[in-house]
Image (cartoon, helix red, strand yellow):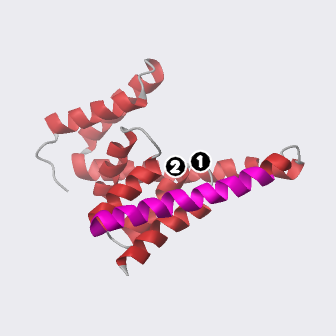
Amino acid sequence: MIYWQLFMAFFIPNIIGYGGGPAIIPLIEAEVVGRHGWMSAQAFAETLALGNSLPSPIATKMAGYIGFQVAGWGGALVATLATAVPSLLLMLVAMGVLYRHRESPRVKRMSQWVRPVIAMMMAWLALDFLQTGIDGAGLLHTLVIAVVAALALLRFRVHPALVVLGGLAYGAVFLGGVSS
């Protein structure tokens, strides 16, 4: 039963999520944290941060890790397959149709209408992570990390992986005693 739950928890967000990994993270969080309670919001945020610091698609890394935490190696395999295989098949079909009709005004309008929805989902996720950070690390640490990360990314054009690693290092040094 747990394998079926894992499969569906990662299959559904990957089938209905339009816009790639960042767009489906809130959907995965709703399944993993909200629906099944396999991890806390804090643990999910930490998993996402660690996953973002590693190469390859975020959703498959998270699926493998969460699947392993829930049901061992079998869970990792099921969750990863639920993430990768359906998305690949759907992408091949959708890209064929969209490419065939790429000049259609309807296809262009569809893409324009989906972007604001993805932006709102990402804003909701960011606010949720901000609240989780404040609850877990406190307002001061959260603001320090946020301001330094924003400056590093926007002003100094530091690679996002290095910013995530810097955040991990900050947490290890200054937040070692904070636990979830």
Question: Of helix, strand and loop, which one carries label 2?
Answer: helix
Circle 1 packing at 10 Å, graded few (<14), some (14-19), many (20+), is: some
User: What amino acid is labelled 2 in the image?
Assistant: Gly
Main SS type for the magenta part?
Answer: helix
**Residue extending furthest toward the bottom:** 1
User: What amino acid is labelled 1 in the image?
Assistant: Ala
Question: Of helix, strand and loop, which one carries label 1?
Answer: helix
The numbered disc on residue 21 is 2
Q: Label 1 belongs to which residue? A: 119
Q: From the viewer's perspective, is 130 left or right of 179?
A: right
**Above or below for 46 versus 31:** above
What is the CA distance from the residue labelled 1 to the residue labelled 2? 13 Å
Circle 2 packing at 10 Å, graded few (<14), some (14-19), many (20+), is: some
**Residue extending furthest toward the right:** 104
Question: Which residue lies at the image location 39% right of the left edge and 69% below the top edge?
Answer: 34
- In which quadrant is the N terminus drawn? bottom left
Q: Which residues are magenta?
A: 71-97
The quadrant in which residue 69 appears is bottom left
- In which quadrant is the C terminus drawn? bottom left
The quadrant in which residue 29 appears is bottom left
Q: Is residue 91 magenta?
A: yes
Question: Which residue lies at the image location 39% right of the left edge and 50% below the top edge?
Answer: 61
Q: Are marks 1 and 2 in contact (CB under 8 Å)?
A: no
For residue 17, say whether it is visible.
Answer: no
Question: Which residue lies at the image location 38% right of the left edge and 74% below the top edge?
Answer: 3
Q: Is residue 174 magenta?
A: no
For residue 8, say whether it is visible.
Answer: yes
